[in-house]
Amino acid sequence: MAGSKQKKMNARVDFTPMVDMIMLLVTFFMLCTTLMKPQTMEIVMPSDKEDIDDKSRSQVAESKAITIMIAEDRKLYFFKGKATDDNLEATEYGQDGVRAMLKEANAVAQEKVAELKAKFATQQSSDPKKALEAKEQYKKELSEIRNSEDTPSVIIKPSDKSTYKDLIDLLDEMQICSIGKYVIDKFTPQDQAKIDRLNGK
Amino acid sequence: MGRFKIKKQDTFIDMTPMSDVMVLLLTFFMLTATFVKEEPVKVVTPGSVSEIKIPESNLLTIFVRPDADNKSGKVFMTMDSKEVLGAMADKVLGQITPEERKAFQLAPTFGFSKDLMKSWLNAPAENRNSLLQKEEAGIPCDSANDQLKEWVQAARDAAGDNMRIAIKADQKTPYAVIKNVMNSLRSIHENRYNLITSLKNGEE
């Protein structure tokens, strides 16, 4: 070990090319992928099987039924209960229109849902397992309220002139107003005649 | 000229923290993201407050696109499993060559009536997506000529009970077209399906 001068090695590695590469990859992934999955609405249409007898077919109690018709240009018409000559009313989309009407008709369930939400808001848990359990329980109780006896049944009748967006918006209102029982039905010429009569044509 | 001793500045910047962060970002993107699916049929879905996510696999998607005049619409279809697509082609189209079958499986979306399907499959691969924009494209699904029914039935037979059906329609589509699609699904007792929407926020 006399005078052998050891050369000091530079231990630093140049990372610049690696950063370049990774930047490129990140840009690629950012541009070519989607993070958001599209939402969906689940819908169950009534079966048209002829062999179902009247008992198993869910009968809509006339007193609890609300029929909403979608006409062209996003105009809505509704009547409650049995169709008579003079109970058709016009309404519109939005907070003050159809939502206010449905919320009023479904006040009992709305109250229950609010209660349920308050109850589960206090039960927030940091444990993921418990949180999941609470969520399941919440969903179960929510669907019970939505399908209980005293919620109204809504019959939606979109006319051929309405658009898909109108239908989805109305289905959305069902969700907002916690209505579990709704069905999409055919828009008949009689319905059109009724609307025309209301508009004084 | 006195002898100044200029201190040699180190121009070497330490890249280690930066590369750390970048690798983290990269891992995040790789793990969370899904690739954009190729969709030659462009639709703008309406927004809704629904928060149910769509299942990832075994999904039959029915696209509905309005025509330029917003009076009528066209129906297209896609399925994420190549095997099911092959089986559907065999069943609905009957006699097809292996090349046609392969072309059918590779197409991201299909939508032609049965008699036009063969010429579409024999078109060069790069033209196929642009052909879908043409006037004669679309699967017929009115009550007189309901081919959508056959396709869905074939898919159900091939994919089994776990297959989900989703309708992805443009928000301007007239309801008359949606009604036709719903009616043809109803006629083969497919009463449960998903309507694809995009997220709308603000209300509730």
Image: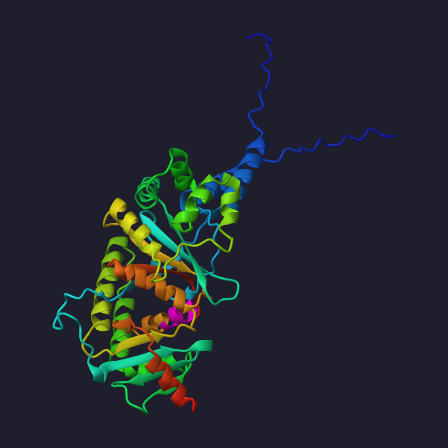
> Could you tell me residue B182's position as x and y percent?
32, 63
Q: Does any portion of residue A67 appear in the rendered image?
A: yes
x%, y% of residue A137?
Answer: 21, 63
Picture quarter with the C terminus of chain B: bottom left
**Residue lying farthest to the top in this orientation:** A2
- A194 over A36 or under it: above or below: below
> Residue A159's quadrant in the figure?
bottom left
Residue at 59% x, 9% y: name it. Answer: A4
Q: Please tell me which residue is depicted at 21% across the width and 83% down the height of the picture.
A: A62
Residue at the image point whose x is 35% and y is 66% from the top: B179
Residue range (magenta): A164-170
* Left or right: B133 in relation to A189: right
Nearer to the camera, B134 or B171: B134
The question of residue A13 being in magenta is answered with no
Q: Position of residue A63 (x, y in %)?
A: 22, 85
Residue closer to the observer: B8 or A165:
A165
The residue positioned 25% from the left and 86% from the top of the image is A82
| B37 shown above or below A139 | above
What predominant SS class does the magenta segment belong to? Answer: helix
